[in-house]
Amino acid sequence: MKPLTERGVFLLEILLCGAVSSALAALLTGFYPQKALLWLLLTSLGGLAGILLLCWRYLQRRDQVVQAAARQIAEYLLANRQGGLECNEDGALYQLFHEVNSLLAIANAHADNERRVKEFLRNIISDISHQLKTPLAALDIYNGIIQQEAADPETVRQFADLSEQELDRIELLVQNLLKMARLEAGAITLERKPERLAELLAQVRQQYLFRSLQEQKQIELLGDEQTTLLCDRVWLAEALGNLVKNALEHTQPGDKILIRWQQSPCLTQISVEDNGSGIHPEDLYHIFKRFYRSRFSQATQGIGLGLSLAKSIIEAHQGSVEVRSQLGQGTVFTVSLPK
C-alpha cells in the first residue's frame, strides 16, 4: 500500500481535528443542553485553533524543505557536486524539484562534455607539437645545408626536394588532425545521399592508381555494380582511401589489393584485402590509435593518422571497422555500414 504523502497527512490531520471538535461539541451539548450555544462556540474556536496550529506546522515543514533544497543547490553550485533534490512526494513543490533535478542533469552533461572537449584539445595540441618537431627539425637542417651549399645546384635541388617532402608531411598532418578534431567535436554534418558503391570505390582506386603502378602493385574491385549506399560520398571515400593507402604501405611490388563489397537486407560490408606483410598480433589492438607506429613495421611513409581518421569517419556513419591479419599472408579491413 502506498504511504500517505505529506499533503495527505496534513489533510487527514485537519479532518481529525474537525471530527474531534464536532464530537466534543455534540458530547458537551448532550450533557449540558442549557449551555449548548456556549459549548458549540468554544469547541468551534478550539477546532479553529487546532486547524491554524496544523497549518502553521505544515508551512514550517514546507519552509524547512525549501531551505534544505536551497542549501543543496548552493552546495552544488559551489562544489560542483553530483546529486539532486529529493522529489519522492506529490505536489507542485516536488514537481519543481523534479524540474530542478532535470536542469542539474543537463548542467552535468554540459560540464562533462566541456571537460571532454578540453581534454581532447589538450591531446590534439600535444600531438601537434610532438609530431611537428621531427619535420621542423629536418627542415631546419635542410635549410642550413642549402645555405652552405648554395654554389652546388645538385645539392640544393636534392635538399629542396627533401624540404618539399617534409612540408607535404606537415600539411598532411595538420589537415588530418583538423579533420579528426572536427569529427570528434561534432562540427561536421554528414550529407548522406544514395551512392553507387562501384562508382565511389572506382574513384578511390583512381586516386591511388598512379602510385600503385609506380610501385608495381594491383588494385582490383569486386562487387555488384548496382549496389547503393546512403552515405556522405566525400567522407566515406576519405575513410576507404586511407585503408587502401595503408595497404599500399604494407605490400611489396607484385602484391595485390582487392576492394570487395557485398550487401545484405540490413548491412553493407566493404573489405580492403591485401596479401602483404600482415600485422603483428601485438599491434592489432592499437592500430586505430592516433600516431601509433608499430615497432615491427617496415613502412616509413605514414604518420599514424590514416587508420584513426578512417575509424572516426566510419563511426560517424554509425558503422564499424574490424581487422584480421596474419603475418606474411596479408590483412583484411572490413567496414560494416547500416544499409
Image (cartoon, rainbow, N blue to C red):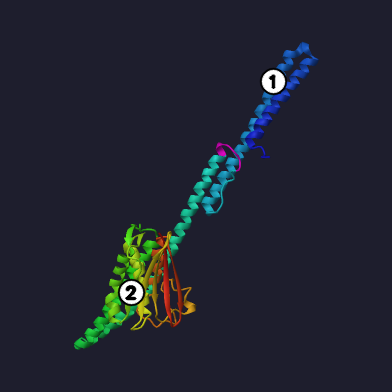
Residues tagged 2 and 1 counted as in contact (Cβ below 8 A)? no
- Front-most of 274 and 115? 274
Position in image of residue 122 (x %, y %): 42, 66
Identify the image quadrant of residue 251: bottom left
Vertical side of 294 occupied by 68: above or below: above
Q: CA distance from mark 2 to mark 1?
A: 99 Å
Secondary structure predominantly adopted by residues drawn in magenta: loop
Boundaries of the magenta span: 88-93
Q: Is residue 124 left or right of residue 142?
A: right
State left or right for residue 252 relative to residue 20.
left
Spot the residue most to the top: 34
Would residue 136 appear left or right of 72 to someone viewing this image? left
Q: Confirm whether the magenta stretch covers residue 89.
A: yes
Q: Residue at x 33, y 66 (%)?
A: 237
Check residue 44 in the rendering and tell me which mark sits there, or answer none.
1
Task: Give the amino acid at mark 1.
Answer: Ser
Residue extending farthest to the right is 31
* Residue at the spot 55% in from the left edge and 40% down from the top edge: 95
The dot on residue 220 is: 2
* Number of residue marks: 2
Who is closer to the viewer here, 47 or 325? 325
Asked where in the image residue 48 lies, by quadrant, the reply is top right
Locate residue 294: give its quadrant. bottom left
- Residue type, numbered disc 2: Glu
Q: Residue at x 55, y 44 (%)?
A: 70
- Dot 1 surroundings within 10 Å: few (below 14), some, or many (20 or more)? some
Q: Is residue 202 visible?
A: yes
Q: Is residue 202 above or below residue 185?
A: below
- Quadrant where the C terminus is found in the figure: bottom left
Q: Position of residue 328 (x, y in %)?
A: 43, 83
Q: Bin the neighbour count of mark 2 within 10 Å (Cα to Cα): few under 14, some 14-19, many 20 and up.
A: some
Q: Secondary structure at mark 2?
A: strand
